[in-house]
Structure formats: structure tokens, C-alpha cells
Image (cartoon, rainbow, N blue to C red):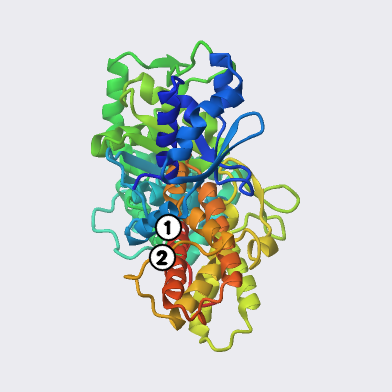
């Protein structure tokens, strides 16, 4: 469906053009003084310079024609030449009915769908997810859902860290503990055991122990490096053990991400591109992109207008081993081959900005990707504690994501406690949904790049701009709908009050908001919007005696309007990766 704002723009621009002014001056926006009007056109002020005429005269030129436009009412000129515009209730109501009967709520799917790959999550095998993994996961998930809703082909990839030094650390630690395992016997030719030699709990203890040891003990670090290199060179026993680490860890990661309502289409990792590395390096060398520098193989990615030094892109270390940069470049190689994406979006912590700048430049310079492929690095800010520093446990350690989720879920469960008509199973499900809404909305309502302070009391409040407040509104509507059956065949009729009209106006903007959240890659716009809708609805609810209304036409219209509000809120929440319970 054409967006309301686009319809209005086209009509007003036509009128400007008719009077010999450039169309662009007929640009209309949502009013920033909703108390005065719904939409406004400020173009006469901008046009004044070009046409050497007073803005009021220009506004007056077009005014009578704009007044004649059927879908407008109460057009006036304000101040030096602003044109205030309102749409008729007939138009608004008709539009709302069209959204209501459209299964995509007024969204037109893209005519030229793109293939978009989103690289998010970024978990590392054998290491538990910590607080820092929350943002890339939920931001990426929201971008994925939003792009998909608009009809694009979207592929989400977790891109596991499964090939680096941490693998060597774990392998050498397992060897220290169980040197007799067949994986370490160079002469072993048989089948390796099917069962992993550790559980997930053991694995979660092995990695931190190994990492701590390697940091303080040079020999242990050397062993870890050697193990990594042996693995990367394809040692049979090490590969078999590595597969166990991968399986045990990924099973657990899948559960953790699914508890967060985050789903990946691909569970690939750094190791998956290994098969392309030789081919890629051959290509880079043959085309003279590489140079040797102190034994390493590099590619110069600096540009003349750089105002900061840009270190060369590292392809190989002096011992011939690959790096994080190599696997990221080879992963692009693989993605182009398998999916030919139009865009690749990375949602990763802001500290990796330089790395990605180098990777993108290198991929373009070496023509591994086409000139038109768009790369985006969405650098997310950190989650901070009240002291403004990255969020930690009480004793200053890194907080596990599980702990964070459990803490907020328990906090919410205590607040919900007094509803004793619900079974404990239902209560758990509700607490989980409300807790996640608090966490995710609290996060996504911030701009991606900004740091924010994790404030549990604020995030989980049932009032204000929070996830629980939106869920509460949805639950309120669901409870109304349990009392009155919806008859979808009866229409929503013209609004009876300003409050009702405001709600309808907000609902009419849903398609516009989804698009702008997509274009600007800004889930916070959706947060802002559903908060506005929830607020409008609650005002309407307090102002309207829906259930006892005797005029059936009115009553059904209100019920349908409530039902539409629920659909808009639930769809908006879904695009943020948030689910609402039926009761709370
Ligand atoms: N595993 C990485 C880390 O923990 C993040 C991966 C981000 N994605 C990528 N393609 N490099 O830092």
C-alpha cells in the first residue's frame, strides 16, 4: 500500500509544480506541532530564495489548490509561510480499514528484493556467551526480521569463532589432563570415539582454566599455539577432538540463542572458509595484490585521503598461518560464491571497526566482491553498569549472558507474583517473555552505536518506555478480545474523538516506520513507534467505554480498532524479536 505520507507528498508536489515551482518544495512531513496540525509543508520558505518572492506569497499561490484536494481538510498558512495540513476522517478511516484487511498491515514488499547477509552473534566455540554477546545477537535478529518482512532474501549467519587460538588452548588443556586419549597418539589409526571426552559443563570449565594458564605461563601458551597450528594443518586426531568441542559447544549455543529468540539460518564459522584459503591466496598473488613485509604477506589498503594511518591488511603471518583477517576475507569469498549477496551487514562490537574497514577495503580492492556490493559495519556500543563502565558481575568478572537473563527474569517474576490464578508453568513462561522484553526493548530502544546503562528497575518497569509496558498493552487488548468476539466483517468507522483519531493516525504510519527502520538500520525507530501506539491506545482505552457500548456499529468499530492495534503492536514487537504473552 502506498504510504499516507507519500500520497500526501505526491499531491502537494503536483500543486507546487503546477504553479511553476520545483516539485521538491512541495515536501510534506509529519507535523512537529501535532496540537496544530497533522502534517506540514515548509517548502515555501525554502523556495523563497530561489524565486525571490516572499514565502507567504508562494504559500498563498498554492493554497487554494491544496484546499481543493479531496483528502485534505483545514488547510491553513501559519507564521511566515508554513502550510498546515490535515487529512479528512474519511480518508484516514478508509486507509485504516485497508491496513486492517491487509495481511502485511499496509506494507508493500520490495519489487526488487535484495539478497542480504547478516553476520551477527559472533559467538566463540568453547567459551560461554557473555553480556557482550547480547547486543550483536538481538540487533542482528531485528534487522533480519525487518528486512525479511519487507520481502528481501535474508540470510543470517552466526559466524562462530571456531578456528582461533582458543581451540588450541582447549586442545592442549585436554591433553594435559588426559594425555592418553587416542587423539594425541600419532600412531593411532583406528576410529576415534563417537562420544566427546567432556560435557558442556566440563568444557566451560576447561576453557577459562586453559586461558588463565596460558596467560601466566609461557610454556602453556607455546603449547596452545602449537596445538592451534597442528589443528589448522589438519592433524587427524586434533581435528577429531576439535569436532567434539564444536558439537558440544554448538549444541549449547543453539539452546542459548533460541532462549533469546534468536535464530540463525547458517551455523557457519571461521573454519568453514578454510577450504577456499589456498585458492584465494593464489588469486591474490597471481593478480599482484600482495606484498611481503618482514616475512608476512600483506595487502596495502591505505587510501590517499586517509587522515589516519591505515595499517596493511595481513593475509599470512610469518609462520604461514592465517589470521582473523584472513578468515573474514575468505568468508566473503565463500559468501559471494554461494549466495552472491547485494549487501553484507556485520553487527559487531565497536572495537572491531578498524578490522572491518581493512577487510572491506581489501575485498573491494582485490575485486573479490563486485563494486556494487554494499558492506555495512554496524558497530554496537557497550552495555555499561551504573558506573559507566562495561557491565560486570558483583566481583568484577565478566557476566554470563545466562546470568543476566536469569537475573532479569527473576526480578520480573517477583513483580508478577500476586497473580495466583495462573499455574507456575504459565508464570514461568510469562516471566520469561516479560523479562526478555525488558532486556531487548531496553537495548534496542537505544541507537546501535551508543553505549547505554543497564538499569534493571527502569527496563522492567510496567510504565514508561519499556518492553513490559508494551506487552502490558497487548495483554490488555487480548483481555478485551476475550470478552467480546471480533466481527472482522464490520468496518472501522470514522473517529469519535481526537484521541481516537490520534490512535488511527499513529496506526496509519506503520508501513512508513518499518521502511525507515529498515533503511536506517535502526530498530530504535520501531521501539519509539510502538511506544507511541501503546500510549495512544491506553489513552483511548481510558476514554472509551468499549465493552458496555450499546451502539453495535460503534462498539464493533472500537473492537476492530483495538484488534488492529494489537496486530500492529505484535508485529512491531516481532520485528524486534519480542513475544507477548496472553496474560500477565
Ligand atoms: N567471534 C568474534 C569475536 O568474538 C566476532 C565475529 C564477528 N564476525 C566476523 N565476521 N568477524 O570477536
Residue placed under numbered mark 2 in the picture: 492
Q: Residues within 10 Å of mark 2 (few under 14, many from 20)?
A: many
Question: Disc 1 versus disc 2: distance between alpha carbons?
Answer: 7 Å
Residue placed under numbered mark 1 in the picture: 93
Asked whether 430 or 62 is in front, the reply is 62
Q: Earlier in the sequence, mark 1 or mark 2?
A: 1
Left or right: 503 with respect to 257? right
Q: Quadrant of the C terminus?
A: bottom right
Q: Residues within 10 Å of mark 1 (few under 14, many from 20)?
A: many
Residue 480, numbered circle: none
Farthest residue to the top: give it: 304
Q: Residue at x 51, y 60 (%)?
A: 204
Q: Quadrant of residue 457?
A: bottom right
Task: Please tell me whether residue 71 is drawn above or below residue 578 in the rendered image.
Answer: above
Horizontal and vertical percent position of residue 145: 39, 52
Q: Is residue 210 visible?
A: no
Q: Are discs 1 and 2 less than 8 Å apart at CB? A: yes
Asked whether 366 or 242 is in front, the reply is 366
Task: Please tell me whether residue 69 is drawn above or below residue 471 in the rendered image.
Answer: above
Horizontal and vertical percent position of residue 94: 38, 56
Horizontal and vertical percent position of residue 253: 43, 59
Farthest residue to the bottom: give it: 421
Q: Is ligand 1 less than 8 Å from the beta carbon at label 2?
A: no
Horizontal and vertical percent position of residue 90: 42, 55
Left or right: 448 with respect to 238? right
Q: Secondary structure at mark 2?
A: loop
Q: Is residue 128 visible?
A: yes
Count of numbered marks? 2
Q: Quadrant of residue 536?
A: bottom right
Q: Secondary structure at mark 1?
A: helix
Amino acid at each position: 500500500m502506498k504510504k499516507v505520507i507519500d500520497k500526501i507528498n505526491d499531491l502537494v508536489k503536483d500543486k507546487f509544480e503546477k504553479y511553476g515551482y520545483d516539485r521538491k518544495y512541495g515536501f510534506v512531513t509529519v507535523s512537529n506541532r501535532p496540537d496544530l496540525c497533522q502534517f506540514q509543508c515548509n517548502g515555501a520558505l525554502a523556495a523563497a530564495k530561489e524565486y525571490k518572492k516572499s514565502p507567504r506569497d508562494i504559500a498563498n499561490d498554492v493554497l487554494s489548490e491544496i484546499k481543493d484536494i479531496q483528502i485534505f481538510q483545514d488547510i491553513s498558512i501559519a507564521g511566515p509561510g508554513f502550510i498546515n495540513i490535515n487529512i479528512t476522517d474519511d480518508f484516514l478511516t478508509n486507509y485504516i480499514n485497508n491496513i486492517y484487511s491487509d495481511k502485511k498491515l499496509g506494507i508493500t514488499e520490495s519489487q526488487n528484493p535484495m539478497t542480504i547477509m547478516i553476520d551477527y552473534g559472533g559467538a566463540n566455540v568453547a567459551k560461554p556467551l557473555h553480556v557482550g554477546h547480547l547486543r550483536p545477537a538481538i540487533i542482528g535478529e531485528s534487522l533480519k526480521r525487518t528486512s525479511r518482512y519487507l520481502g528481501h532474501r535474508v540470510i543470517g549467519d552466526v559466524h562462530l569463532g571456531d578456528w582461533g587460538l582458543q581451540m588450541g588452548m582447549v586442545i592442549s588443556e585436554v591433553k594435559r589432563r588426559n594425555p592418553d586419549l587416542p587423539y594425541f597418539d600419532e600412531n593411532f589409526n583406528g576410529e576415534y570415539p563417537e562420544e566427546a571426552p567432556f560435557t558442556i559443563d566440563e568444557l566451560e570449565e576447561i576453557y577459562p582454566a586453559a586461558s588463565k594458564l596460558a596467560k601466566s605461563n609461557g610454556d602453556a601458551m607455546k603449547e596452545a599455539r602449537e596445538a592451534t597450528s597442528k589443528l589448522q594443518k589438519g592433524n587427524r586426531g586434533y581435528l577429531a577432538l576439535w569436532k567434539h568441542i564444536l558439537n558440544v559447544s554448538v549444541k549449547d549455543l543453539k539452546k542459548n540463542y533460541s532462549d533469546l529468540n534468536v535464530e540463525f539460518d547458517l551455523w557457519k564459522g571461521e573454519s568453514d572458509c578454510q577450504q577456499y584459503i589456498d585458492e584465494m591466496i593464489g588469486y591474490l598473488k597471481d593478480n599482484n595484490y600482495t606484498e611481503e613485509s618482514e616475512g608476512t604477506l600483506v595487502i596495502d589498503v591505505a587510501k590517499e585521503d586517509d587522515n589516519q594511518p591505515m595499517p596493511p591488511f595481513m593475509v599470512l603471518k610469518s609462520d604461514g598461518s592465517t589470521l582473523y583477517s584472513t578468515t573474514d576475507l575468505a568468508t566473503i569469498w565463500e559468501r559471494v560464491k554461494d549466495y552472491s549477496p547485494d549487501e553484507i551487514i556485520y553487527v559487531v562490537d565497536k572495537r572491531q571497526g578498524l578490522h572491518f574497514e581493512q577487510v572491506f577495503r581489501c575485498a573491494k580492492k582485490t575485486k573479490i566482491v563486485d563494486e556494487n556490493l554494499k558492506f555495512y559495519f554496524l558497530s554496537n556500543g557497550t552495555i555499561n553498569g551504573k558506573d559507566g563502565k562495561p557491565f560486570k558481575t558483583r566481583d568484577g568478572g565478566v557476566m554470563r549472558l545466562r546470568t543476566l537473563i536469569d537475573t532479569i527474569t527473576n526480578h520480573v517474576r517477583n513483580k508478577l507474583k500476586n497473580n495466583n490464578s495462573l499455574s507456575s508453568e504459565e508464570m514461568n513462561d510469562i516471566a520469561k517473555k516479560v523479562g526478555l522484553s525488558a532486556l531487548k526493548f531496553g537495548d534496542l530502544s537505544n541507537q546501535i552505536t551508543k553505549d547505554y546503562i543497564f538499569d534493571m528497575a527502569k527496563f522492567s518497569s510496567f510504565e514508561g518506555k519499556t518492553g513490559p509496558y508494551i506487552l502490558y498493552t497487548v495483554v490488555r487488548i487480548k483481555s478485551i478480545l476475550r470478552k467480546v468476539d471480533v466481527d472482522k466483517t464490520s468496518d472501522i468507522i470514522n473517529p469519535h474523538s481526537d484521541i481516537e483519531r490520534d490512535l488511527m493516525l499513529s496506526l496509519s504510519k506503520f508501513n512508513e516506520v518499518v521502511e525507515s527502520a529498515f533503511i536506517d538500520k535502526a530498530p530504535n525507530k520501531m521501539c519509539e513507534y510502538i511506544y507511541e501506539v501503546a500510549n495512544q491506545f491506553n489513552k483511548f482505552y481510558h476514554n472509551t467505554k468499549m465493552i458496555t457500548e450499546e451502539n453495535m456499529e460503534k462498539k464493533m468499530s472500537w473492537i476492530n480498532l483495538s484488534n488492529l492495534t494489537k496486530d500492529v503492536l505484535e508485529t512491531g514487537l516481532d520485528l524486534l524479536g519480542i513475544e507477548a504473552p496472553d496474560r500477565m
